Image: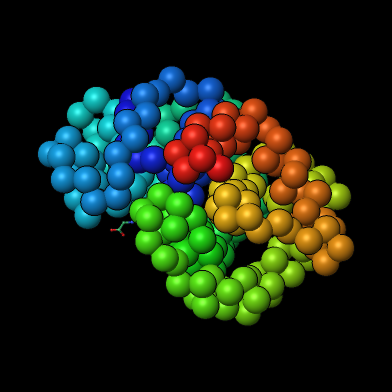
Amino acid sequence: MILYGVGLSPFVRKTLVTFKEKGLVFEQRPVMPGDKSDEFRCASPLGKIPGFADGDFKICDSTAIITYVEAKFPEKPVLPADPAQRARTIWFEEFADTVLSAQVAPIFWNRVVLPRMMGQAGDEAAAAKAETEGLPPLLAYLEGQIPASNFLVGDRLTLADIAVAAQIVNLMHAGYEIDAATYPKLAAYAATILARPAFIEALTAEKAMFGG
Ligand SMILES: N[C@@H](CCC(=O)N[C@@H](CS)C(=O)NCC(=O)O)C(=O)O
């Protein structure tokens, strides 16, 4: 199996960590978004990362890729069997991939990608607006959702945790720390999820990309 994309993308990171948590054997080809190679475009026609190939089967989109591997390799599931738990897992994945990502992206793009990887000035006003206006209500929502288990759904790791933590990593890369005084449960939760070997491995490789 081949996973196309660089781990700095939260969607690639979500997929990569899921593969590692499930113990899958795969190769990562670190293509950038927009890569024009036929090999990548067969998997990802719009050029977005991640793309994926399993022999002749090719697909893109982190959710579609994870749906495929979860069905093909049901051991070490990241989607719970219980209907309500599965629905909540998909809800948190959706929350992370859409509304949370929409606030994380301007912070990461303008404070990491543009200045540190592309040698261009970032739009600090856009980053500051996301940090001070967009992000706080979303973090407050998550703060209220974390149960005593320290997993978002049930009492074990699910795709909900992987998707949310994959976004939090991009905040960390941008130097943003979750304030433990304001968000005590979320800060402790993030530290626990990001201490998992799959995240540590992914982060070590990523930091080398921008000297973080
Ligand atoms: N819903 C997609 C989103 C993928 C996505 O937007 N990836 C970004 C990188 S973080 C990308 O490739 N952007 C390039 C573009 O939009 O052309 C997924 O979950 O995989």
Q: Is residue 174 left or right of residue 209?
A: right
Q: Does 70 sit above or below residue 103?
A: above
Q: Position of residue 174 (x, y in %)?
A: 57, 55
Q: Does 192 sit left or right of 172 as displayed? A: right
Residue nearest the viewer, comparing 79 with 150: 150
In percent of width and height, residue 107 lies at 53, 64
> At 29% from the left edge and 39% from the top edge, which residue is drawn?
31
Query: What is the quadrant of residue 30 in the picture?
Result: top left
Q: Residue at x 83, y 58 (%)?
A: 180
Residue 165 visible in the current orientation: yes
Quadrant location of ligand 1?
Answer: bottom left
Picture coordinates of residue 158, whole percent (x, y): 63, 43
Q: In which quadrant is the C terminus drawn?
A: top right
Residue 93, located in which quarter of the rendered image?
Answer: bottom right
Q: Is residue 68 above or below residue 101?
A: above
Residue 18 placement, left or right of 190 = left
Residue at the extreme top: 25
Name the quadrant of the N terminus. Answer: top left
**Image mark count:** 0
Of 101 and 85, which appears nearest the observer? Answer: 101
Whether residue 63 appears in this view of the structure is no
Q: Position of residue 106 (x, y in %)?
A: 48, 67
**Which residue corresponds to the image point at 51% horizontal and 61% vertical from the top-left?**
111
Residue 210 position (above or below residue 122): above
Q: How is the image coloured?
A: rainbow
Q: Residue at horizontal 60%, vertical 35%?
A: 199
